[in-house]
Amino acid sequence: MKSIWQGSIAFGLVDIPVKLFSATEPRAVSFKLFCNKCKSPLKYKRYCDKCKEEVPWSEVIYGFEISKEKYKFLTREQIENLKPEKTDTAEVLTFVDISSIDPIYFQKSYYVIPAKNKEKAFYLFLEALRASARAAVVKLVMRNKEYICVVRYYKNVLLLTTLLYLDEIRKMERFEELKDRPAISSEELKLANKIIEKYFSKELDIGKYHDEFAEKVKALIQGKKVKEIKKKEAKPEKLIEALRLSVKR
C-alpha cells in the first residue's frame, strides 16, 4: 500500500518521521458509461456553445460567481500561485480532549505509521497521547490544501482525522421550520423510549451490516440469481398507532 503523505510531526523541538495511509476504502459500486449501440466508452469534452468548438486545457480559465451570472475570472497560473506552500511537517498547534470536538467536524481518517522501524519518538508520542487521553491538533498541507487535523491514539497506532472548517458547517438557523415544535404527549415519549430499549445494543457491531445494493450488483455481474425486493407493508398513518404497533412487534 502506498502512503499518501510522508513527513514529520513537529512535537515541540522533536521531529517524528511518519507516513500517512488511508484508513478507509469506500466500496461503492462504480460504473463506466458506454454507447448502447456500439458499446464504446463515452468521453466528456470541454465544449463552448458560443464558439462552437472544443476548448483545450491550455485555454481554460476559472470563474468564481460573485453575483447572479456575474463572474470574476482567474487563470490557472493565478490559482497555482495562491496554493499553500508544500511542506513535509505537520505542526502541533495544541492538545485537547477528543470528546470536546463535535463529530460533525470529522472528515477523513488516516493511519499514522512511523517512517522508520522502532522509531522511539513515535512510540513516545503515541504512549503520551494514550496515557493523557488527549489528542493533538495539527496543521498539515496535503495535496495542495491546508488542513487542520486531530491526531489521537487508536488501537496501538495513531489516527489522523482531517477536520472541516467552521464555515463549512451549515448553520441551523437556515432551517426556520425547526423553530415550531409540536407538543409531545407523555404516552408518545414512553412508547418511543420502549422502542429504543427494545433495539438497544451496548456496542455497534458494524460487521452485521452490508451494502446490499453493491452485493446484488456484484451477484448480477457474476450471473447469480438476485432476490427481488419485497414490498414493505403499509404503516399506520397515526403516530401513536405506529408507536404501539412497534412496541408489540
Image: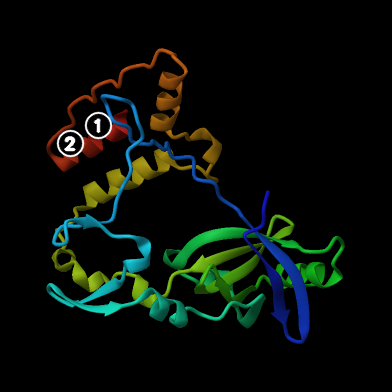
Residue drawn at the location 36% of the way across and 62% of the way down: 57
| Mark 2 residue element | helix
Residue drawn at the location 61% of the way across and 65% of the way down: 160
Disc 1 to disc 2: CB gap under 8 Å: yes
Q: Is residue 205 visible?
A: no
Q: Quadrant of residue 195?
A: top left
- Residue 227: x %, y % from top left: 36, 16
Residue 220 horizontal side relative to residue 188, left or right: right
Of residues 249 and 20, the one drawn nearer to the viewer in this rendering: 20
- Residue type, mark 2 in image: Glu
Of residues 166 and 172, the one drawn nearer to the viewer in this rendering: 166
Q: CA distance from mark 1 to mark 2?
A: 6 Å
Q: Quadrant of residue 175?
A: bottom left
Crowdedness near tag 2: few (<14), some (14–19) or many (≥20) residues, C-alpha within 10 Å: few
Q: What mark, if any, has residue 241 been given in the picture?
A: 2
Crowdedness near tag 1: few (<14), some (14–19) or many (≥20) residues, C-alpha within 10 Å: few
- For this orientation, the residue located farthest to the bottom is 13
Q: Quadrant of residue 9?
A: bottom right
- Residue type, mark 1 in image: Leu
